[in-house]
Amino acid sequence: MDKNKHKDTLPNHLLEEFDQNVQPEINLIWEKSGLAEDPETYLSPEEIENALHLVHGRIDEDGSLPDKTNTGNIINGWINTYARFAVAAVALIVAGTLFFLIPITATVPYGEMATIELRDGSIIEANSGTTIRYSRLYPFLNRHIEFNGEAFFKVETHNNPFIVNTNGATVEVTGTQFNIRSWRDEPDGHISVTVTGGEVRFLPGLDQIDPVTITPGKESRWSQKLSEPTRPEPVVIEDILAWREQRFVFREQPLISILMELERRYNTTIELTVPEVKQSPLTAYYSQPASVESVLDDICTVKGLRYTQTTNGFRIFN
């Protein structure tokens, strides 16, 4: 291989797919793969077959091997040929290993919802804007999921535990059904876990903190501002899962959080130019909102605000 055609380091957009602690090893694998020779320089199977016929023909003619010099040349040729094949095999193994180390990433576009079925039969129903990442070797290597967004999980029982890592917290189960709401970009940073079946262990990614166990019909919340998850409390499951039926149920949520939800659901942009009301709580129920405008009408009426349509979406002002 012309080494000028092989970059010394893996391109950043691929390297960033891996955790920081394994990036040096991935770069090393990539560098080693650059030592492989171009497969186009190898002998074809037809050329190898012809060479073998030639040797066998000379043995058949006089019942002896060719002279030592020619035999040595042939053997050296075979060694060089098979060495090239060995290098090619190593290169293929490295490339294959690199491929399997790159996780699968699924992102649900704004304005849409999606259902993802995993190889073990587990199902994830994901809300608009949700991102899910997991290993190509799932579930054989592990059942770890990296998660940002909102989704309802139906997890099948398996020898490997099902673990969701989300914005500094961990949810661990074996087989159960639960909902996670965890948006990295929301100002309050709350992560809520609600269980509808089975049990869930919920803990922040901090040392020396015991997990809480959440049972059906209960919810626990945690954010970076809390030292530990809240004690699981009963909730109205139908309200928590309203998004699955494209309904809106806001329970004392900050206005900015509600507006971000509208942006994801309707694939639009909403600019709030009144910063003092961003954390103002609001409770609202919509069984079938006709449009984003109808929701904005109600919000602005309750909060004493106004809105206008812009080129990119909407702007809310005094």
Image: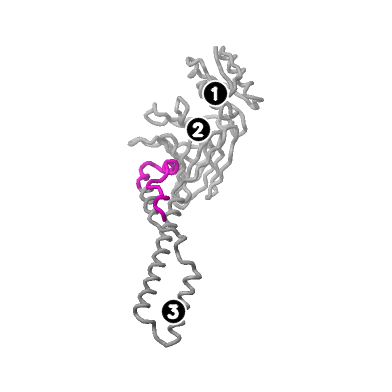
Q: Decide which of 260, 64 is in the foreground and name it.
A: 64
User: Which label lies toward us, 1 or 3?
Assistant: 3
Q: What stretch of residues is rendered in magenta?
A: 1-24
* Neighbour tally class for label 3: few under 14, some 14-19, many 20 plus, Cα within 10 Å: some
Residue 197 image offset from top left, x and y in percent: 53, 40
Q: Name the residue under label 1.
A: 259
* Dot 1 amino acid type: Leu
Which one is earlier in the sequence, the residue at label 1 or at label 2? 2
The quarter of the image holding the N terminus is bottom left
Q: Gap between marks 3 and 2, in whole Å? A: 71 Å
The residue that mark 2 highlights is 181
Residue 151 screen position, x and y as percent: 53, 36
| Relative vertical location of residue 130 with respect to residue 45 in this rendering, above or below | above
Report the disc number at residue 55.
3
How dense is the environment of label 1, judged by Cα within 10 Å: few (below 14), some, or many (20 and up)?
many
Left or right of 170: which side holds 235?
right
